[in-house]
Amino acid sequence: MATRNIIIEGNPTLAKKSRSVTSFDERLATLIDDMKETLVQANGVGLAAPQVGVLRRVVVVDLGEEIIELVNPRILEQSGEQDGLEGCLSVPEKFGMVKRPNYVKVEAQDRHGDWFEYEGEELIARCFCHELEHLDGHLYTERAYRMLTQEEYEDMVRQEKEQEEKA
């Protein structure tokens, strides 16, 4: 496994649509393993292959207890609404407010080509939507209805920590 470089906003690769994975081979396994290591090293929640310069429909999402691998993912269902803060490893030190579904069910293949479904709410639903948009060449900044200043972001983080400490 190796840590890959995360490409940054402005790189034309991030604006391109990714191709479906058709070969479930060692090369794919290496990409997924490298993406998982890169995600952990970057302290992120999700990472899409285009963010490491590979135009393939592959995403990894850190669920806390495990990192889920999604190959050729697509959203099957979504419902509800949440409004929250988003950032992106490819858009460093910028944060914005984005409306997303509160519940999302995805269908994807694993590294061996077997199909499965996974569903998530709140942060997981947000992450699925965010990462799958990368596969179609989109960044959250296109969807954000308001970008925060660094001071606003720091105030929001401080307030969340204070609320967690009170709970």
Image (cartoon, rainbow, N blue to C red):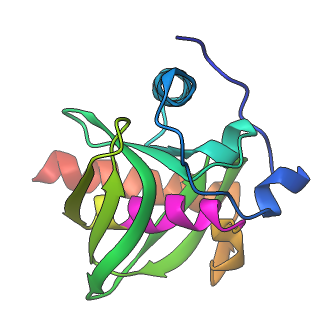
Q: Residue furthest bottom?
A: 80
Image quadrant in which you'd find residue 102: bottom left
On screen, residue 35 above or below 11: above
Residue 11 or residue 156, whichever sits in front: 11
Please state the horizontal and vertical placement of residue 63, each as a whole percent of the image. Answer: 26, 43
Q: Which residue is depicted at the point 61% across and 17% down?
A: 3
On screen, residue 24 above or below 122: above
Please state the horizontal and vertical placement of residue 120, each as a whole percent of the image. Answer: 22, 63
* First to last magenta residue range: 126-137
**Visible residue check, residue 26:** yes
Q: Residue furthest left?
A: 167
Does residue 74 appear to the left or right of 81 in the view shown? Answer: right
Image quadrant in which you'd find residue 140: bottom right
Please state the horizontal and vertical placement of residue 40, each as a whole percent of the image. Answer: 46, 25
How many numbered marks, from 0 up? 0
On screen, residue 46 above or below 14: above
| Main SS, magenta residues | helix
In the rendered image, residue 166 lying in the magenta stretch gets the answer no
Please state the horizontal and vertical placement of residue 123, each as a whole percent of the image. Answer: 32, 60
Q: Which residue is depicted at the point 83% across and 52% down?
A: 13
Q: Which residue is depicted at the point 78% across and 55% down?
A: 14
**Visible residue check, residue 123:** no
Q: Which residue is depicted at the point 31% across and 78% down?
A: 76
In the rendered image, residue 133 lying in the magenta stretch gets the answer yes
Residue 26 or residue 142, whichever sits in front: 26
